[in-house]
Amino acid sequence: MKKLNILVACEESQAITKELRKLGHNAYSCDLLPCSGGHPEWHFDMDVFKVIKNKGGVLQNGDKVKLKSDWEMMIAHPPCTFLAVSGARWYYHPDDNKLPFDQRRPHPRFPNRAKDKEEAIDFFKKLCEAPIDKIAVENPVGIISTRYKKPNQTVHPWMFGDEAAKATCLWLKNLPMLEPTNIVGKGERVVLSSGKSLPKWYSDALTLSKTPAERRTMRSKTFIGMAKAMAEQWTRNLNTNDKI
């Protein structure tokens, strides 16, 4: 297998980056946040589009990287806060739910939500259309399907050995759809006092996290089985040069 230059965008956990590194690829994570995956020497904590344009940048540990050739693949995880269907109720004033959308007032707690949503959509599109030959962009079920285009595929962690349900939509460019590797149970669910049930991993993210930032990190986690499948299947039998 030849070594690929791979950028994993919006990934502070480095879950996929580490799997790609195990396979010998020249993989780097990138996020505005410092990495929590333990490898600052593989992490750009800066604007992803500058990293793409400049073929590198300054790593979290202070080292500089400048590729001799282009990024050959990008796997991106743009923030879903303003894109997921679960956040739709925060766009408009709760008293206006029977009015046409163009007559609804902003939500009193989140008056800039509509603007944030449009910026998130633009960011998502820009990742999908980046000048990189092979691209995968993932997100939960949300508004991108109607505001941009439908995903090529939707997968769950339980298709790759982790007993958890988490619908993960994939928008793919020059990459194959993921094939299940180990189908297991869909995982434990927690029944709330309202009667609604949630996957236990998601409920834990809501109840065990201490800050909104920690809650977002736990909810956006990449399960190890899916990370391995992405790393292995999307780099399998790809022809590329050896320059880095």
Image: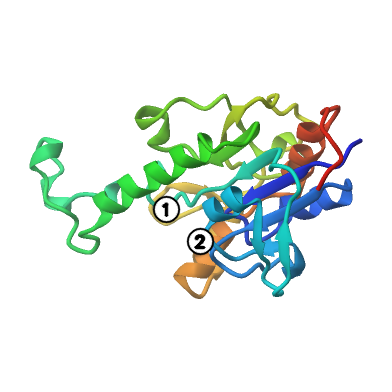
Secondary structure of the residue carrying numbered label 1: loop
Q: Which residue position is annotated with label 1?
A: 81
- What residue sits 80% from the left and 41% below the top? 4
Q: Nearer the viewer, residue 79 or 86?
A: 79
The amino acid marked with disc number 1 is Thr
Q: Is residue 129 visible?
A: yes
Q: Who's the residue at 51% across and 34% down the image? A: 129
As rendered, which of 235 and 111 lies closer to the eye?
Answer: 235
Q: Are marks 2 and 1 in contact (CB under 8 Å)?
A: yes
Q: Quadrant of the N terminus?
A: top right
In the picture, measured across the screen, residue 111 lies left or right of residue 10, that is: left
Marks 2 and 1, how far apart at CA:
8 Å
**Mark 2, residue position:** 216
Residue 13: % across, % down: 67, 61
Above or below, 13 relative to 76: below
Q: Give the residue type that dot 2 points to.
A: Arg
**Badge 2 element:** helix
Q: Is residue 147 above or below residue 70?
A: above
Horizontal relation, residue 158 to residue 96: left or right: right
* Residue found 50% across the figure and 61% down from its top: 216
Q: Residues within 10 Å of mark 2 (few under 14, many from 20)?
A: some
